[in-house]
Image (tube, grey):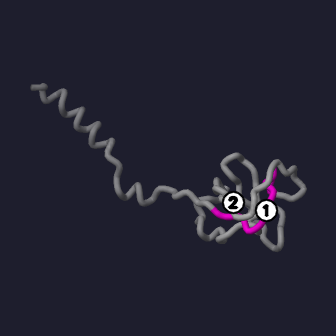
Amino acid sequence: MLPSLLVAPLLAVVALAVPSPDLEDRAVQPCTLKTTTAVKYRKCASTSCTAVGQYAKGANVKVSCVKAGQSVNGETAWVKNPSGYYVSAAYLTPNLDKCGSQYLC
């Protein structure tokens, strides 16, 4: 049998390792949008920035964050993907309200 002085710290560590359901509910959920057409992704949030690649129509775009940039078809929001490149939200669906404000850059 272990002395109680050794068991108490172990129980405290185990209790801390169990995630709280409340914290899990508040975790940022991944946000993925789809392209409405073939669209280029760029080094910055402007069509004047270098295009480094292109998404096909219907491709999934994972959202790292959203920032304001050059207006495209009246839309100033640009999505930054996990690789650090930008796509105009004008070519993504559903709209960015799906992602929520936790995605602002």
Q: Amino acid at mark 1?
A: Ala
Task: Please tell me which residue lies in front, 56 or 30.
Answer: 56
Q: Which residue is mark 1?
A: 38
Crowdedness of circle 1 by 10 Å Cα count: few (<14), some, many (20+)? Answer: few
Q: Which residue is mark 2?
A: 59
User: Does dot 2 land on a helix, a strand or a loop?
Assistant: loop
Residue found at the very far right of the displayed protein: 48
Asked if residue 3 lies left or right of residue 43, the reply is left
Mark closer to the chain start, 2 or 1: 1
Q: Residue at position x 80%, y 50% from top?
A: 53
Is 97 located above or below residue 10 in the figure? below
How many labels, in total?
A: 2
Where are the magenta residues, as a range? 33-45
Q: Amino acid at mark 2?
A: Ala
Q: Residue at position x 66%, y 48% from top?
A: 82
Whether 36 is among the magenta residues is yes
Question: In the figure, residue 8 lies in which quadrant?
Answer: top left
Question: In the figure, residue 48 lies in which quadrant?
Answer: bottom right
